[in-house]
Amino acid sequence: MSLPVLDAPPAGTGAGAVPAGPELGTAGGVGRGSWRRPAVGLALAALAWLGLYVGIAPFARWLTQGLLGLDGHGHAGAAVQFFVFETPKVVLLLVGVVYVIGIIRTYFTPERTRAMLAGRRETVGNVLASVLGIVTPFCSCSAVPLFIGFVESGVPLGVTFSFLIAAPMINEVAVVLLFGLVGPAVTALYVGTGLTIAIVSGWVIGRLHLERHVESWVYSVKVGAAAPSVRLTFDDRMRAGAGAVREIVGKVWPYIVAGIAVGAWIHGYVPERALAGILGRGAWWAVPAAVAIGVPMYSNAAGIIPIVQALLGKGAALGSVLAFMMAVTALSFPEMVILRKVLRPPLLAAFVGIVAVGIILVGYLFNALL
Amino acid sequence: MKLEILGSGCKRCQQLAENTKSAVRALGLDAEVVKVEDMASIVGYGIMATPALVVDGQVRLSGRVATPEEIGRILRG
């Protein structure tokens, strides 16, 4: 997911969110009392958030059963209560997490990640790149300059791929939605196996020594030195967090509402175990089919996950569902088109193939285990 | 003043270009706003996250879209 990264703080940092008062110092420095107001503001916001969060379940029950008089166990009642409960819950979670991650990400620019990965041995590099892929801001439109920047600075090809696999797959929207709608266990599984796939796939690609399949113009391009990074005040970071919320939640909320609406309908009206036949554990072809459908898809996790949650509740096997989600987020047709500018077809095919196989294996593994 | 918007043509790059033009108009600056989509140039500036704003050859913003107000502050400061 893309995230804003602050470069230069605006001249005169005293303007904006920081109130007038004791001199707050210049961009690099922080005055003595300057962290108090934002810290108190953050604490109050966190409390308000918690209060709202805790209040959602009772509110949903009241609205559905009290105000509308529906039976919580009937079709309409179940669907409505699901919708009224899940929508604000997910939106609140998203706002909170995107804000916090937005702040964390101001500490991890692509330039810094590149510096940390340049010249690393593989294996260690693969692990580090995958983890950094989670916290470094990444937008697939920047895939090409990022790829070139990494490769030209001595980051091994396989390590670069570990980053490129982890970054879109383990994005905070997907993680938050999984956590809020499905539960911490599945979320941990998703993140854990996602990291493993990124590490191993990147390592395998590195071992295959496919450097000759990188487009040659990449190696002849002159890479400029990174712009000197500017010190950000905590205030700038908070503003970046707020900007991230506006940008991401602002873009994604219609899909969430639509997705939860569909999920609510499935929850209320589709019988339990209805999907056990087609998407259950017995259907061996479900996993490869899920991956085959998911790979070309370009989607926001936002719309799909609420549906995924409802499907899981109706008997779809966890492995098949996880595989589908990973296929959707890790790879997409538009991303392949973009990467084609720097990767020759054999390398591009190897990339897609290795990741797809990894995802299929994970799908089978979880169908077998759980 | 030469302003370059670096980006491969996605929506965010266009948004940054529009916001930059608004800022230039609002400040009444005599500035040339150019959209650069050529990868070699983008990488030549050391940019790894688009969109980016380059003012007279110096990178002043990278990886996000800024409001016309913030761009105005960058151009003035």
Image (spheres, coloured by chain):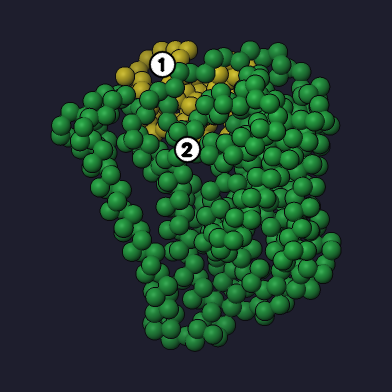
Chain colours: A green, B yellow
* Quadrant housing the N terminus of chain A: top right
Mark 1 neighbour class, 10 Å CA radius: few under 14, some 14 to 19, many 20 or more: some
Q: Residue at x 36, y 61 (%)?
A: A50
Name the front one of labels 1 and 2: 2
Identify the disc placed on residue B31.
Answer: 1
Left or right of A215 on screen, residue B57: left
How many marks can you see? Answer: 2
Q: Secondary structure at mark 1?
A: loop
| Disc 1 chain ID | B
Residue A11, position as x, y percentages in the image: 30, 24
Q: Is residue A250 above or below residue A370?
A: above
Q: Residue at x 57, y 52 (%)?
A: A174
Residue A240, picture quadrant = top left
The residue indicated by pointer 2 is A105
Left or right of B74 on screen, residue A368: right
Q: Is residue B17 above or below residue A61?
A: above
- For the residues marked 1 and 2, what is the alpha-carbon distance in whole angstroms? 33 Å
Q: Residue at x 69, y 45 (%)?
A: A196
Q: Which residue type carries mark 1?
A: Ala
Residue A129, picture quadrant = top right
Residue A109, position as x, y percentages in the image: 50, 30
Q: Is residue A197 above or below residue B49?
A: below
Question: Looking at the image, which residue sits at the far left?
Answer: A21
Residue A32, position as x, y percentages in the image: 21, 32
Looking at the image, which is closer to me, B41 or A111?
A111
Looking at the image, which is closer to me, A297 or A150?
A150
Mark 2 neighbour class, 10 Å CA radius: few under 14, some 14 to 19, many 20 or more: many
Would residue A164 be seen by someone viewing this image from the given angle?
no
